Amino acid sequence: MLSILGMVQEPGLIDLVGDGWGMGMLGRAVGAGLAVIGAGIGIGRIGGNMAESMARQPEIAGQIATQALILAVLIEGAAMFALVIAFLIPSNIAG
């Protein structure tokens, strides 16, 4: 079974020639993954705290929802910026 994996794997992802292409792609993937995970954690915490705050003070639920939405948009903007930077990492890191 393991010998089949070597045949179906894309040869460009392995850095056999030492040009840094594989490491550049790895850096892009790690950067994009961290950006998405961080945004997900941030928006999840905003949603949880928003629900808790609305349960404690229902009279200002509208203000809480508005502020939570603004914070979520700011987090998404930062995540998009991080994704763009991650994909702008040059393919040739080694040289």
Image: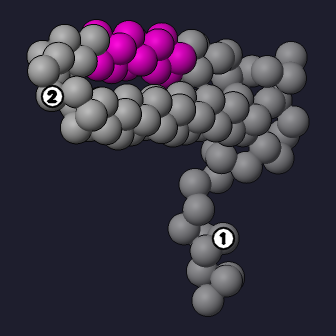
SS majority, magenta? helix
Residue 76 located within the stretch drawn in magenta: yes
Residue on which disc 1 sits = 6
Residue on which disc 2 sits = 58
- Judge left or right: residue 65 versus residue 19: left
Task: Describe the element under mark 1 as helix, strand or loop.
Answer: helix
Task: Write down the region rendered in magenta.
Answer: 68-83
- Judge left or right: residue 94 versus residue 73: right
Identify residue type, mark 2. Pro
> Alpha-carbon distance for marks 2 and 1?
59 Å
At 58% from the left edge and 21% from the top edge, which residue is drawn? 86
Marks 2,1: beta carbons within 8 A = no
At 54% from the left edge and 68% from the top edge, which residue is drawn? 8
Picture quadrant where residue 17 is located: top right
- Label 2 crowd bin: few (<14), some (14–19), many (20+), radius 10 Å: few
At 24% from the left edge and 18% from the top edge, which residue is drawn? 64
Picture quadrant where residue 7 is located: bottom right
On screen, 35 above or below 55? Answer: above
Q: Nearer the viewer, residue 32 or 13?
A: 32
Task: Describe the element under mark 2 as helix, strand or loop.
Answer: helix
